[in-house]
Amino acid sequence: MNQSVKKKVFIKTFGCQMNMRDSEIIWEVLLGAGYEMAASQEEADVVLFNTCSVRQHAEDRVIGNLCKLAARKKKDPEFKIGILGCMGARHGEMLLKEYPFLDIVAGPSDIYSIREALEKVFSGEDKVLAVKNKKRPRKKVGNVYWRGGFSAFVNIMYGCNNYCSYCIVPFVRGGEVSRPKNEIINEIKELVQKGAREITLLGQNVNSYGKGLTNKIKFPKLLEAVNKIEGVSRIRFTTSHPKDADKSLFRAIKDLDKVCESLHLPLQSGSNKMLDLMNRGYTREEYFDKIDLLRSMVPDVGLSTDIIVGFPSEKEKDFKATEKAMETIEYNSAFIFKYSPRSPAVSACLVDDVSEEVKKTRNNELLAIQKKISYRKNKELLGSRQEVLVEKMSRMSKDEMTGRARNNVSCVFPGDEGLIGQIVKVEVTGASAHTLKGRCVKEL
Ligand code: SF4
């Protein structure tokens, strides 16, 4: 970059862990090109929004944030603003037309062209649109950038080929592409050298990892390789698709000492009619069988899920089937979403015929059910000893620390900041729906 005074960049990230990791990669690109991090939007020469499109609410938040910058841009045309990520891919040129003060629009596949895009707008080009929506390989452009702490995200694959009917990911993130094993292992080693202890492997469907690679490998084998890396204490992964989760995955959770006993397995609906309309590729019965198998192999596994209520044509009996599924499976936690159509996903062509009121009622009913289940399951852990990776000071008290047990349930206990990043043993003495309370027995 040819700039005598280094430009300062502020990146605001919306949405999922994929986006958090993408923002780190954008930093890798920009720090390597000579840009600096701004401590706040106010002191930045460039503000980049790395955005999420999964629900309308997520997009509305981005637009709210964007519009707040319009006045500053009017006074200072040298100030640059970009929308990156899923909204960039979904809306493309429309954003530049609708918000004329915007300088750059780019999609998740175009993450590596941010440097060129900034060079163009700073050298006087009016606007830059960089939305190719194609498969995205990982390019190493410099030292791996990591936000720090002790927990790091590592992409093992990008994109998705599943086309669940409600989901725009395959449209905005492109088709599935796996990274070669060696590249992933080297990245993890670099992160461990920088201080990471917990590695979360990221992919839209980690269970289909390896397809298309020259050196054939499946996800459990990748877990085995990561498990061997010295310095890694814990391994997590997300997201697993139920149609591809199988015994070999469950065996890896059972046998590999660093892989946490925890699985996020989105059910989406307990009704076979809905699952079919959602194009999920499994039935309720198949899903139940997999949970039974997993629990027979890993009895203390922590389970979480995603559920959509109010999908087009969802009748009361479909909803009841979801309710029943949740009561039968007894997840430790669940994320419940009200359906909203997202074009160009296929379901956007269906009539959105469940009223907002019904969606809200169903949403609240499931939240209440899950709260009771979470409380019951947490109470079952009273008296047990949990291995907790200490994350931060508790929001409620400066004399308490918080972290997550291997089953991914959060745990609060008396302690000080010196414990952050350590794995400690906590005896569980109390439980609420969302948290375990305990006391530190001894450091491991
Ligand atoms: S598996 Fe389905 S829900 Fe998940 S990213 Fe792919 S299309 Fe979307």
Image (spheres, rainbow, N blue to C red):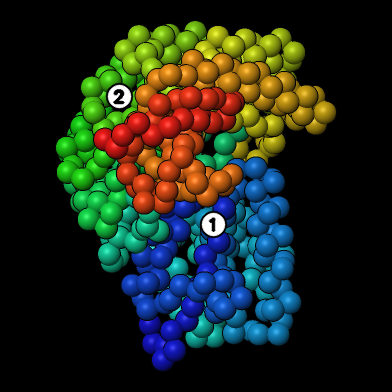
Mark 1 residue type: Thr
| Point 35% across, 31% down: residue | 441
Nearest the viewer among 249 and 436 is 436
Q: Which residue is mark 1?
A: 13
The image's mark for residue 253 is 2
Dot 2, how many residues are within 10 Å of its Cα: few (below 14), some (14-19), or many (20+)?
Answer: many
Residue 32: percent from the left, percent from the top?
33, 72
The image's mark for residue 187 is none
Residue 68 lies in quadrant = bottom right
Q: Secondary structure at mark 1?
A: strand
Quadrant where the N terminus is found in the figure: bottom left
Task: Give the answer, above or below, for where 381 lies relative to 80.
Answer: above
Taking the image as shown, residue 248 lies to the left or right of residue 129, namely: left
Nearest the viewer among 210 and 47 is 47
Taking the image as shown, residue 197 lies to the left or right of residue 428, namely: left
Residue 403: percent from the left, percent from the top?
44, 39
Please tell me which of labels 2 and 1 falls first in the chain: 1
Mark 2 residue type: Ile
